[in-house]
Amino acid sequence: MILSLRNIMKSYSTAEGRLEILKGIDLDLDAGETIALTGESGSGKSTLLHLAGGLDRPDQGQVIVGGRDIGALDDRGRAQYRRSEVGLVFQQFNLIPSLNVAANISFHARLADRFDPDWEREMTERLGLQHLLARYPEQLSGGQQQRVAIGRTLAARPRLILADEPTGNLDEATGDSVLDLMLSLGKSAGSALLLVTHSARLADKLDRKVLLRGGMIAG
Ligand SMILES: Nc1ncnc2c1ncn2[C@@H]1O[C@H](COP(=O)(O)OP(=O)(O)OP(=O)(O)O)[C@@H](O)[C@H]1O
Ligand SMILES: [Mg+2]
């Protein structure tokens, strides 16, 4: 088991009072497994991903990654976890504008001390980015930028990838091919994937689907 969520509860306090968003989530992700997380807008998908990624802490419950409770770590421990063990991909590509494509791709792998030139070369070719390595993010199309963002995440071969609508900004055909690349590279890297998507069609490409409804996993 790479990720275990145990009875996760999360609420936010707002001007309208306390909002209970997650009311006891249990979810297990095996090593190398891919799961699509679906649910209505506002159901708490991004909230759940942020907790799994160590960007936030649950009110109650455990986020166990590789046997360790991430939610119990202090800020520094969670920063270390994000840097070294997990790969995050968001709808916004979040590339570093002052670095070229090659440097963007190797950035996280170098930070995590897992830079591997052979894997990076193979991945860059499979992503179709080899002729774009000297360009800067602003000189790329949306689909190209998202391929760089995926390359950056996969360069470090994280055991766990968390992706929040990673193809949400792309047209359907580009989004499909970017997701296919992510799935096939993730398999090569041995990464498990928890992917938030609104698209039933994209969700069908993954091993398993789970639906978030009313703060619970509905199926
Ligand atoms: N920091 C916050 N403070 C208060 N409320 C928040 C905060 N973040 C999210 N929420 C609320 O929590 C609920 C769940 O938000 P979340 O972003 O997890 O939904 P989602 O399922 O990802 O939706 P979408 O599909 O639109 O991205 C929403 O009602 C949202 O308004
Ligand atoms: Mg969201």
Image (cartoon, rainbow, N blue to C red):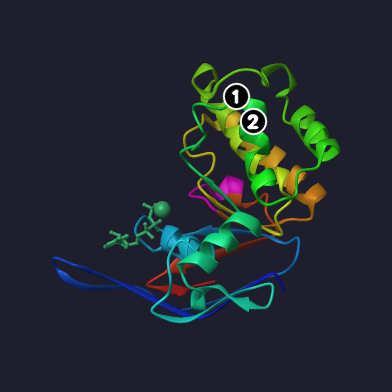
Q: Secondary structure at mark 1?
A: loop
Q: Residue 213 appears in which quarter of the rendering?
A: bottom left
Q: Amino acid under label 2?
A: Ala
Residue at x 46%, y 67% (from the top left corner)? 75
Residue 22 position, x and y percent, is 39, 73
Residue assigned mark 1: 100
Q: Is residue 88 above or below residue 128?
A: below
Q: Residues within 10 Å of mark 1 (few under 14, many from 20)?
A: some
Q: Position of residue 118 (x, y in %)?
A: 86, 37
Judge left or right: residue 169 versus residue 27: left
Instruction: Say if residue 23 shows up in the picture.
Output: no
- Tell me the amino acid under the disc marked 1: Asn
User: At which x and y percent is residue 184?
Assistant: 76, 44
Q: Is residue 104 above or below residue 188?
A: above
Residue at the location (68% across, 37% down)? 106
Residue beneath the point at 57% across and 33% down: 146
Residue 208 shows up from this direction: yes
What residue sits right under mark 2 in the picture? 103
Q: Secondary structure at mark 2?
A: helix
